[in-house]
Amino acid sequence: MSGSAAGGPLSVALLTYSTRPRGGVVATLALAEALARAGHRVSLWTLARGGDAGFFRPVDPAVEVVAVPFPEVADETVGERILRSIAVLRDAFEAFPGGYDIVHAQDCITANAVADCVRTVHHLDTFTTPELVACHERALRRPYAHVCVSAAVAAELAAGWGITATVIPNGVDAARFTAAAGPEAPARAARGHWRARLGRYVLAVGGIEPRKGTADLVEAFALLRERVTPVSLVVAGGETLFDYRGYREQVLARAAQLGVEPVILGPVAHEELPALVAAANVFAFPSAKEGFGLAALEALAAGVPVVTRDLPVLREVLAAAGDAVRFASTPTEFAAALEAFLDSAERRPAAGAEQPRAGAGAGHPRVAGGRAVARGYSWATAADRHVALYRELIRTQATGRPTRRISVTTDKSSISL
């Protein structure tokens, strides 16, 4: 039995398709750092798109970052970009000397780019672009082992592809978002900055795209126009590999027709996001497809109530938060749930200089319940469960795949090929 299988440090390559703050990328960074804190040697591979110098936030120096340059190409279609992404990452990975105990791809692009990999299926998509359809299918069929971040996604994978996955939930950096809602002067000032700019607001994170259900949220918000107390719809985020300009144009045209004027922030700096979330009156999460619901859990950690799409995965992850979460399926239901949270805040007097918030005070049972659920998901636990899976895969070698090992040096925190 090898030292790695028996309990020594593992060498692990984690691969993600982007340096930008999408949910899967956020999770991959956190997992890499948790594995490194547990004493393992971790290389984090990524495509550095459009001249990106690194990830959207600093990475623990214990994690080796291998950033593969991926320049922009004018007039490239989505399908062409997907195929080039796979080819560029594959060529760089195959040229890299040595190997790893475990190669773990985190998305369909990276699972197509490397052989003999474990694959995390964060969620299952439906595509129409031929290259994406093929990419998605190969990325499910080729890996020799699979991880899902929720039982609901694992059930979809089993039902649709006959694949049995190991369920390992993501972690949540709950303390970071709870601190942003705290009474300390810096936290209060950061929240005050957003409230001075935005007033009272309902926040959605993830940009304007079909999977995020933005169209339904706009329809729901139109039903709130007659409220006595004004409230804004704020949409943050939106970095993505895909081109959703057509959908965005349709959503904004419909918003104008309905008299809804969303405030579109675009990507928000990593260090500013917790305060933006903590200052919101309600967090809206109308996603049509999710694998875990990390952004909603971050809102709960900040003491902000959540209105979310009624999906099996979100019931699985969020239902234990009790009345900190309301589930909805239609724009009318979303509007009613949003209004219920907003009304509950308006019936209470404001505390000090703070505006009334639907999340109530830190000691309110609603806040405590939501925070307890968020704290229940730990990246240290997620890392431990990944290591247990990795060791079992190394021990059994059930598919006869070669086990590649290397002593990865980490005297540099970042390597650009």
Image (cartoon, rainbow, N blue to C red):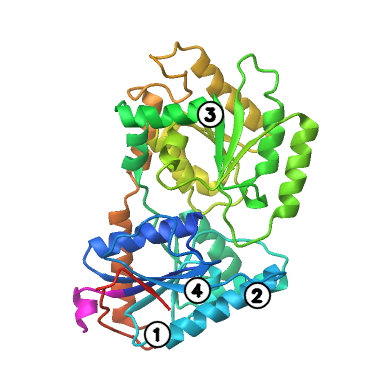
Label located before the other in sequence (1 or 3): 1
The quarter of the picture where the C terminus appears is bottom left
Residue depicted at x 56% and y 31%: 202
> Are the residues tagged 2 and 1 within 8 Å (C-beta)?
no
The crowding category of the residue bearing disc 1, from other C-alpha atoms within 10 Å (few below 14, some 14 to 19, many at least 20), is: few
In magenta segment, residue 2? yes
Q: Could you tell me residue 271's position as x and y percent?
A: 40, 44
Marks 4/2 in contact by CB < 8 Å: the verdict is no
Three-letter amino acid code of the residue under disc 3: Arg
Which dot marks residue 96?
1
- SS label for mark 3: helix
Residue under circle 4? Answer: 69
Task: State which mark lies toward you, 4 or 2.
Answer: 4
Q: Residues within 10 Å of mark 3 (few under 14, many from 20)?
A: few
Residue mark closest to the camera, 2 vs 1: 1
Q: Which residues are magenta?
A: 1-11
Residue 21 percent location from the top left of the image: 49, 54
Label of residue 180 in the image: none
Residue toward you, 82 or 70: 70
Q: Residue at x 62, y 61 (%)?
A: 125
Q: In front: 135, or 322?
A: 135
Asked whether disc 1 touches disc 4, contact meaning CB atoms under 8 Å apart, the reply is no
Residue at mark 2 to residue at mark 3: CA–CA distance: 45 Å
Q: Given contact means CB atoms under 8 Å apart, are the residues at marks 4 and 3 in contact?
A: no
Q: Secondary structure at mark 2?
A: helix
Foreground disc of the pair 1, 3: 3
Check residue 134 in the rendering and tell me which mark sits there, or answer none.
2
Residue assigned mark 3: 197
The amino acid type found where label 1 is placed reads: Phe
**Residue 150 falls left or right of residue 1:** right
Q: Is residue 101 left or right of residue 239?
A: left
Q: Quadrant of residue 63?
A: bottom left
